[in-house]
Amino acid sequence: MSILGRNVLPLTVHASVLAPDWPWGFWSHMIIFVVIVMAFVILMAMGFIWFERRVISRYQIRIGPNRIGPFGLLQPVADVIKILIKEDIVPLNVDKIIHLLAPAVAIIPAIMVFAVIPFSNGASLVDLNIGILYIVAISSISIVGQVMAGWGSNNKYALISAMRVIAQVVSYEIPLALSIIGVVLFAGTLSMNGIVQQQSIPFILLQPLGFIIYFLASLAEVNRTPFDLLEAEGEIVAGYNIEYSGFKFALFYLTEYTEAIAISTIITTLYLAGWKGPFLPPVLWFLIKVFAVFTLIIWVRATLPRLRIDQVMGFAWKFLLPLAFINLLITGVQVVAWPDLSQWVIVAVNIVLSAVLIVAFSRMFRTKGDKVEA
Amino acid sequence: MALKTETFILNAGPQHPSTHGVFRMRLTLDGEVIQDVEPVFGYLHRGIEKLAEGLTYPQDIVFTDRLDYLASMTNNQAYVVAVEKLAGIQAPERAEYLRVIMAELMRISSHLMAVGFLLNDLGAFLTPLLYMYREREKILDLFDMVCGQRLTYNYMRIGGVSQDIPEEFIPALKKYIDSLPGFINEYEQLLATNEIVLIRTKNVGILTKESAINYSAAGPVLRGSGVKWDIRKADPYSVYERFKFEVPVGSVGDIYDRYRVRIEEMHQSIAIIRQAMEQLPQGEIQAKIPKVLRPPKGEAYGHIEGPKGELGFYLVSDGSTNPYRLHVRPPSLINLTALKELLVGVKIADAMAIFGSIDICVGEVDR
């Protein structure tokens, strides 16, 4: 296929909803799939918002939103309507262009990640042969939007938040990318669909250490508890989006949830065998796994307090990074030296190794609690 | 290349999620590190001390409720202790026992709030706080049973208490007291072994023994620093010398010690309530006092161990129906004087945790 005179073979659209002889074959497919993906993301974000509020209420012995619609299902709709008819306040001394652009810069890459996520066998917008590399590259751009918001708002809380986000996200990129390489080594491909197809055993078993590193690093990437420093409610009030209201704030809010969905889907794809599963249709399996991962994230949020900025950085550089290197080394040796070994043997070895490594590493960072003498 | 940097001033408060009301701190920051702190208070000043001069002695009780609104019962008690000292009144035994039970329940309730808000300041998204609220709610139900109020009790009277406890109170109290240690232990398992809580609270915000004494800090802040000082033991009032209980103290004086001291004090309060329930005598709940109380000329300082520290009322009488002067020794305010020493040099995140660990109530700071 050629676009603008260039040969772009990897850009193939799967799961034909339209007859191939439709006018502008490629482009009509493309547009329809973009609409589907966008609708999916926004609907999922609304679903996630409802889901998170309901689930976290259970942790907090509350009921949660239950007034609008059955089980409060329409609560996000009401919220969106409310937020869209609010006044859009632009403070006096903001950097107007940066202030205006920041929400767009934040949301677009967050949605672009979904272009390569396989929702079912081959059902992705494009099956890039460098899918996972594309995700690593794109997902960091959202941060630029948050930094722009923090800088452009002319607010000290926002500025502190911007400062924190740069330090934090740049640090966590490294263990994040290194843990993904472990998966890529086992799968032998960078394509997201290819990685799913390679998982006869879910990679969470083959790569338990990699999974833990990826999970923690991605929590830090998307600023969820305990790494939610850039919007630390008790310290810097709301962080980078403090001066935003109305539609622009809605975009930031959506970005946050889009990113949470993105990491849930990526974890599902990389470690939980994506759409694979018996009996149920693949899309359903995919959604079940995504919601399971998201529940784990909510659980963490409902339980843990927040770390301090130096502890967050220390955790990335002293804990996650060495572990990620060790994981990469172990994986590399297993792939190169014993390519014919049964995968179940590797599963057993890796689980034991991970447990030993994590216990050993946490010993070094232990803070012991003791009793107050009476 | 050396970058040119400069410090900037950040206003934390009066409207800020972590300032527990309308307290304000002007923080001078170098990046994340605090260089200087200037506390600003008075946003909630209602002139309670001045108002008292225009009111009779019994009328003032209702205003003491509004000082530390998370511990109204102990405020009541401190005030009536001071007035009784001034006028030479002795409350009946049953009333003293009821006061002790109420004050210890109030202490548990106040400590629950203190620990819950501390964890909220550490960034735990409301969960611990809401569990604390659940337990506090049961205490409020007990108070509701006794005096019909949930926040401003106005329960203590000069020379007694306003009304006797209803029949169903003691069984309800017993049931609650039996369930509470289990709850506190459950909570402890969740938090005292949590690595993030430990790393955020241990060796952070250390107030040394000497500084704590120099700042005349009191209550859990002082005891967290390792000073064994509790008015209930040091200068026993009411019937406290009849109960067996320990005074928990910390060793380092960091946030964690203050937190642990509060948890241990809840256990001690439970022990005191148990003993008070067993010993509770029958009889009058109100001493005979004149209809119009005119204490003799003179002055008196009555103090008790409030949940937040030494709570004292200083009264001067000119022989009329109204106090000539009323002064409150608010533990929140006195404990806050150590704030600058604790905050300079730490990061913003720790500042909020330290502030939370001091456990202030702005109603009492500003009065």
Image (cartoon, coloured by chain):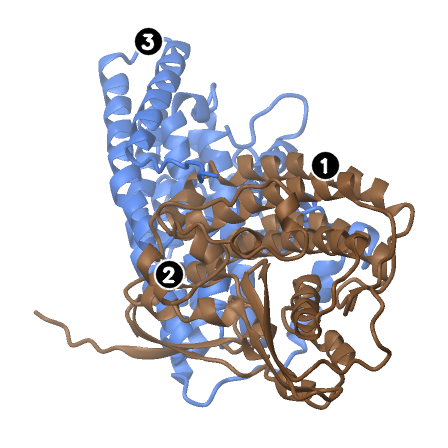
Chain colours: A blue, B brown
Q: Position of residue B213 (x, y in %)?
A: 37, 62
Disc 3: which residue: A341
- Foreground tag (3 vs 2): 2
Quadrant for residue B36, please give it: bottom left
| Separation (CA) of disc 3 from disc 1 | 56 Å
Q: Is residue B58 above or below residue A364?
A: below
The numbered mark, 1 or 2, whose residue comes first in the sequence reads 1
Residue beneath the point at 47% across and 40% down: A266
Dot 3 amino acid type:
Leu
Is residue B4 something that shows in the picture? Answer: yes
Kind of residue sitting beneath label 1: Ser
Along the viewing direction, whichever of B216 and A130 lies nearer the viewer: B216
Residue at image position (52%, 42%) is A264
Give the class, few, some or many, for how many residues have Cα within 10 Å of label 2's Cα (few <14, many ≥20). many
Q: Secondary structure at mark 2?
A: helix
Above or below: residue B339 compared with residue B26? above
Report the front residue among B88 and B302.
Answer: B88
Q: Which mark is residue B212?
A: 2
Label 2 resides on the chain identified as B
Q: Is residue A161 above or below residue A116?
A: below
CA gap between label 3 and label 2 equals 65 Å
- Work out whether A163 lies above or below A123: below
Give the residue pinned by disc 1: B179
Q: Amino acid at mark 2?
A: Ala
Residue at image coords 73%, 65%: A78
Disc 1 chain ID: B
Is residue A11 at least partly visible in the picture?
no
